[in-house]
Amino acid sequence: MKNSKTLTNLARSFAGESQAGLRYQIIAELCIKQGYNTLATEIKTIAKNEVNHAKTYYDLLTDRNGTARNMEICAGYPFEKLTIEDGLKFSMDAEREEAENIYPEFAKIAAEEGFEEIAKKFELTAKVEKKHEQIFRFLYENFKNGTLFKNSKPAYWECSECGHIETLKEAWSICPLCGASQGFVQLKLN
Ligand SMILES: [Fe+2]
Ligand SMILES: [Fe+2]
């Protein structure tokens, strides 16, 4: 393991997933500040997934390599002040890159180097990132088009605060039961 590419790839995965986890939390906080509470909830769920990916890779790395080694790894660290729309686009693109290129490549290398169990973890992660890409795509497109709370046909909407439900083409701007704003209406992810 010591001189393998897979060891470096585990460290890169840990770094990338840690970054993604925190970046998504930052975007979620921005959503809350602007009143998009259920959008923030969806993003926080994905952030939690990324933190758990990071932990998985941390454990794989330390189990194989011991705990007392400092590794220097080279990676991109983009710093940009993002709007919600930019943040959703950034996240969607990052997830696609992970799902289609990064993890399949890491899996291939791990298999070639004889680390079957680690190759499997990379493959499973790629599948999750594909799902994340789809969620971010939905959020990005609907946020950009102003259709997060609109539907072409009457749809079932629910207030995440009080549970108020109604079937409408567009969700209420203020909940008639509890007064929560539209940003608290549950999103429709599919
Ligand atoms: Fe991840
Ligand atoms: Fe992801």
Image (cartoon, rainbow, N blue to C red):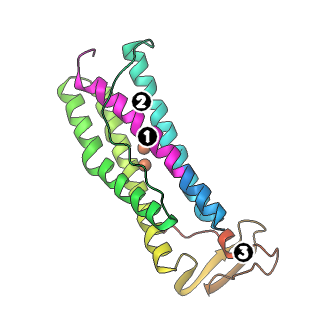
From this view, report whether residue 19 is shown above or below residue 181.
Answer: above
Q: Is residue 109 magenta?
A: no
Q: Is residue 139 left or right of residue 119?
A: right
Please give the label number shown on residue 57: 2
- The tag earlier along the polypeptide, 3 or 1, is 1
Q: Is residue 69 left or right of residue 159?
A: left
Residue placed farthest to the left in the image?
112
- How far is mark 2 from mark 1, CA to CA? 9 Å
Q: Which residue is mark 1?
A: 17
Q: Dots 3 and 1: beta carbons under 8 Å? A: no
Front one among 87 and 189: 87
Q: Quadrant of residue 140?
A: bottom left
Q: Dots 2 and 1: beta carbons under 8 Å? A: yes
Residue occupying image coordinates x 56% and y 51%: 26
Residue 156 percent coordinates (x, y) = 62, 78
Q: Secondary structure at mark 2?
A: helix
Q: Which residue is mark 3?
A: 181
Amino acid type of the residue tagged 1 in the rendering: Glu
Disc 3 under 8 Å from ligand 2? The reply is no
